[in-house]
Amino acid sequence: MKILIIRNVPSYMDVKHNTYNLQEVGLAKALIRKGNVCNIVFWTNNEEVNEQILFDNEKKSITIFYRQSITILKNAIYKNLDHLISQYDVIQPCEYNQLQSWILAKKYPEKTVIYHGPYYSQFNKKYNLMCKFVDLFVLPTYKKKNTCFLVKSNLAKKFLIQKGIPAKNVTVSGVGIDLDVFSENISDNLPEEVIEIDKFNNCLKLLYIGRLEPRRNIPFLLDVLKNVNNKGIQAILIIVGNGDEEYTKRCFDLSEKLNINSKIHWIKKLEQKYLSFVYQRTNIFLLPTYYEIFGMVLLEAMFFGKPVITTLNGGSDILIKKDDDGIVLDKFAAEKWADVIVTLKDNTRIGSRAHQKIRDNFTWDSLCDAFISVYSSRIK
């Protein structure tokens, strides 16, 4: 089978210098290992070129087609893909609401399988409003053309079914981790900010990785840190990520007010290839998010055997069996989160089960059979 993955989002993916957990690359590798041909279209606003990614000791390869597009808001509508598409049995664009997905489903109904992640959330007001407009013309096409969807979570499946997409056309596939990205030995070149985490070895090291933004509820995270220390636990919060200047300033003004600045180790920017060494140096991963399409950080933290505490979101919905291999809390109550952290500080069982679940069930190699099954249903 020949599959073309189309990332129809106008953001540049630099495969020459970074393939760290690029979902399209991880999936393509797994599909090729199963005996398929799989290549990828990525957006560029520069010269249209083709790049090769070699893997499995350079015995296998993926071709990346960098292509220009018409860009409308966050939609990339590619020009002149017809000749390329004609060479493939299946095309996989992303997100039901993207104009490119709609165009392809309409033009190539027998080839198109859409990979979708978002779901309804009250926090997502702009997205919800946009969907009301988009639904007027995309939903009739998807229903008429019997379009198939692969989705990242049960929440995403529910979202599409409630819009009238037949349940038989929506398959939950999840998101995988690419173990190749952790195989590079770079431990001799670690940045000082990562090495400095070791100076807190006598403390409970809590970890947050991601952008500092309202969706991720950073002030609450700081309140949790304060509460943990108030319980007599020497805890440090490792933050990896940055955000808008105004929001970031508000967060650290709050940390100063709470008198916890000395208990925060902030790494503003870090190459993704070093993240595995951060996970390995910390104890518990926290993600108090209002909304998460999936959250690769949840997948990664669990893979590295970290107990995860988070909310109900796209990732936790499919990854975590509550209180067995992770903790999902339904309220933003800082003292409750602190109590759970205290109970987890010596718990090795949850992290061990989390690691085993990801290794067994959420690598791209283990997930890709679900993709192949849906692709095969489109080939007559």
Image (tube, rainbow, N blue to C red):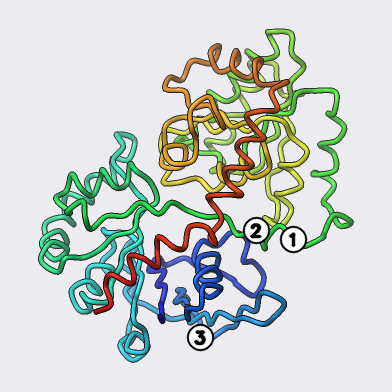
Nearer to us: label 1 or label 3: 1
Q: Who comes first in sequence, dot 2 or dot 3? A: 3
- Residue underneath mark 3: 47
Q: Is 101 drawn above or below residue 2 in the view shown?
A: above
* Residue topped by disc 1: 183
Tag on residue 61? none
Q: Viewer-nearest of labels 2 and 3? A: 2
Tell me which corner region of the image, top left, top right, bottom left or bottom right, holds residue 259: top right
Q: Quadrant of the N terminus?
A: bottom left
Q: Does residue 279 appear to the left or right of 378 in the view shown?
A: right
Labels 1 and 2 touching (C-beta < 8 A): yes
Amino acid residing under circle 1: Ser
Marks 1/3: CA–CA distance: 32 Å
Residue 278 percent coordinates (x, y): 74, 43
Dot 1 or dot 3: first in sequence order is 3
User: In the displayed structure, would residue 226 be above or below residue 54?
Assistant: above
Per the image, label 3 sits on a secondary structure element best described as loop
Residue to which mark 2 is pinned: 179
Name the residue located 38 percent from the left edge and 46 percent from the top edge: 153
Between 45 and 226, the one lying in front of the other is 226
Left or right placement of residue 152 versus residue 250 in this view: left
